[in-house]
Amino acid sequence: MGAAAAAGSSPAAAAASTAIRAAWRAVRWHVVVPGLQLAVYVCAAMSLMLFLERLYMAAVVAGLWLQRRRRKRRRSRRRRLAGDDVLKRVLDDEEEEEEDHLESGDDRRCPMVLVQIPMFNERQVSDRARLL
């Protein structure tokens, strides 16, 4: 009788099992492996893009920092060289314009305002707060 009979399975079941294994091998090598390789290449490309983005952002921040530092040095050098009052007044006006810029956050002309954004269930929340 043979190994198939000893294992308690028929030759037809053994042939079906062999066919299923062969089909899985064919699918695995032609579909699964290329799909996983593609996923690995995509992940590597995305990691490289993230690294390049961080490198670019570091360069931008360093450039802005150096530009601000250079601007401050130039301003202090101008002050030292400015012996007459007219040039000093012009430089002071330029500084005040920079300091009074609306986006700088140090604007003393505009008061700070608290803006309340209504929630979608504000009426229910206020009713619940009144009950407490």
Image: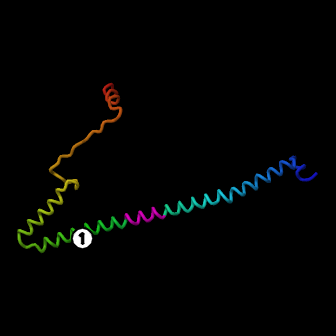
Q: Is residue 12 above or below residue 88?
A: above
User: Which one is nearer the viewer's eye here, 89 or 25?
Assistant: 25
Q: From which residue to which does the magenta span run?
A: 48-57
Q: Secondary structure at mark 1?
A: helix
Closest to the observer: 14 or 109?
14
Q: Is residue 41 magenta?
A: no
Q: Residue at x 29, y 66 (%)?
A: 65
Picture layout, residue 30 above or below residue 114 = below
- Left or right: residue 4 compared with residue 30: right
Considering every residue shown, the one lying at the far bottom of the view is 81
Position of 73 compared to 27: left or right? left
- Amino acid marked by disc 1: Arg
Provide residue 19's location: percent of width, then percent of height.
78, 53
Q: Quadrant of the C terminus?
A: top left
Comparing 129 with 55, the one in front is: 55
Query: Is 50 placed above or below 9 here?
Result: below
Image coordinates of residue 44 in percent, x first then y, are: 53, 63
- Quarter of the image holding residue 90? bottom left
Residue appearing at x 29%, y 39% in the figure: 117
Furthest toward the top, the residue is 131
Q: Residue at coordinates 49% horizontally, 62% vertically from top-left?
A: 47
Query: Circle 1: is it few (<14), some (14-19), or many (20+) Cα within 10 Å?
Result: few
Picture coordinates of residue 89, whole percent (x, y) = 8, 65
Residue at point 12% right, 66% down? 91
Question: Is residue 52 covered in magenta?
Answer: yes
The residue singled out by tag 1 in the image is 70
